[in-house]
Image (tube, coloured by chain):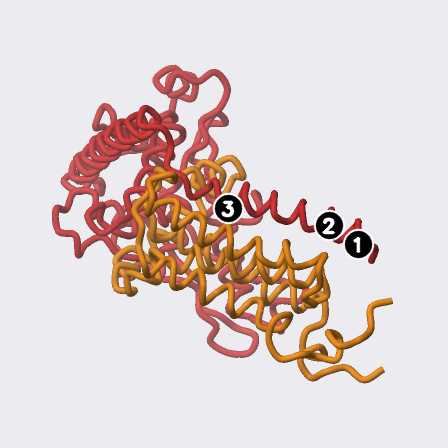
Chain colours: A orange, B red
Amino acid sequence: MRRSRWEKRNTRGGFFLAHVALPLVAGAALYLLARPTSLVLFRWAEMAGFEASVARARDATHGLLPLLPGFVRLSLPNALWVYALSSLLSALWDHRATAASLPWLALGPALGAGFELGQAFGFVPGTFDPVDLALVLAASALALRVPFGRPTLASIRPTP
Amino acid sequence: MKTTTRHLLSLVATAAFVTFAFGSLKPSPEEEKKRAQEQLDNRAVYDDWVKKVGAAYSLVAGMNLAGSPDKACDGPALLKLAKEDYQLRLPTVYGPYLARFASSNPADWKEDKGPWAFLTESTFRGHFEKHASARDAYALDGTARMIKNDWQKFRFLIVLWPEDESANRLPKITDTRTFDSGSFKGWVLLLDPIDKNVACQKRIFVENGETVSSNESFTKNPQKAVQNDFENRFEAAIEGALPPQVKSTNNMGALLK
C-alpha cells in the first residue's frame, strides 16, 4: 500500500520523539531554567535526583535566559505542552478525525484554552495573558493539522 | 488497535499530561515562605564558609612554609574535631585555587584552566567557578548544601600547596619513547577553616617513574600515559601524607578509579 510523504517521514517512534517527547522536554527545560524555583516541578526534580544537574544548568545559563523574549520564557512552555498532548492523542487515533476520535482530539486545545480562559475569569490561579492563549491555539492547530487539514491516504482509507 | 484500547490509552495519556501540568503550580504560601527562608539560611552558610576559607587561605599564604618542619596528622584527634567516628572524606584543593575565597573581586572567581586544575577535586572546583553574585540562587543553594553536608561537616580541606609554582611542571613527551618527568615540590596541608589553622602538614615531592608502561594508551596517547603515571604517584603521595582516618575524594589517580 502506498504511503503519503508525511507518513513516511513519521514512523511511530520518530513521531513520538519529535512531536511528543521533544516538545515536552523543551517545555520542562524552559520551566526548570527560566522560572522561579519554588514551583512544584523543582521538588519533583529533586526527588528524582536531578537537583545537581538542574543547578548546574541554571548556573550555566544564568544571565542568558533573561535575554530570551518574554513569550518564549513565559508562554511557550504551555503551548509546547498542548502541542505534545494533541500530537499524542492524534497519533493514538491514527491522525484521523472520526466520531470516536473527535472528543480526544478536541481535548488538548480545550484543556490549554480552558486553563487560560479560566485565569481570565478567575477560576484558575494565575494571570490571563492573550499571548498565552494565542500560542496555545496556534500549537493546537499545528498539532492537529493532519487529522483536520489536508487529507492523507490514511485518513481516506475506509474504516474496517 | 481496538477502539477501546485507543480510548484507554488516550485516557492514560491525558491523565499523565495533566499530572505533569501540576508541576507548573506554585506551592502553598507556607511552603513558599519556608523555601524562601531556607534560601536565606543557605546563603548565610555559603557566605560564612567562604569567608572562613578565605581567612584560612590568607593565613597559609602569609606563612613561611619553606622553613617549617612537617607536622604529623593525628588521625583520632582530627576525627574528634570533626565529630566523626570512622573516617573523613575530604576534597583536595590546589592552594592557589583558594585565593578567590579571600578576594572580593568577582573577576577572580573563574574556571581554573591551569595545568594543576586536576589537583582540585572536580565537584569542589565546579561549585566555586563563579562569584556568588554571578550565580543562580538555586545553584547557590546546592553549593550551600554541599558545604553543610560535606565540606563543613568533615571540617578540613586537603590543600596541595606548591613551594614554587613556576618551578613545578607536568610531564611532557619529548620523543616517541622518551619524556621529561613531571615535578611537584610542595606540601600537603590539612587546612581547618573553622579554627583558621593548619592541622598538619607534610612536605611532598612527586615525579614520574624512570619508565612508564601502559597497555594501550602509551602508543595511542603517550602524553596521557605519562600524565596518568604522574597523577597516580601524586595520589600515592597524598595518601602517604595522611593518616588512615583521612581519605581524599579526588579520583585523579588509579587508587580510586
Residue type at numbered disc 3: Asn
Lower position in the chain sequence, tag 1 or tag 3:
1
User: Looking at the picture, how far across and down is residue B124, in whole percent?
Assistant: 37, 44
- Residue at 16% x, 42% y is B102
User: Looking at the picture, how far across and down is residue A14, in whole percent?
Assistant: 67, 69
Classed neighbour count for the residue bearing mark 3: other residues with Cα under 10 Å, few (<14), some (14–19), many (≥20): some
Residue B133, placed above or below residue B69: below
Q: Nearer the viewer, residue A126 or A107?
A: A107
Question: Mark 3 falls on what kind of element?
Answer: loop
**Which residue is under mark 2?**
B7
**Which residue is under mark 1?**
B3
Residue A6, placed above or below residue B212: below
- What's the CA distance linking mark 2 and mark 3? 53 Å
Mark 2 in CB contact with mark 1 (< 8 angstroms): yes
**Which residue is under mark 3?**
B251
Residue type at numbered disc 1: Thr
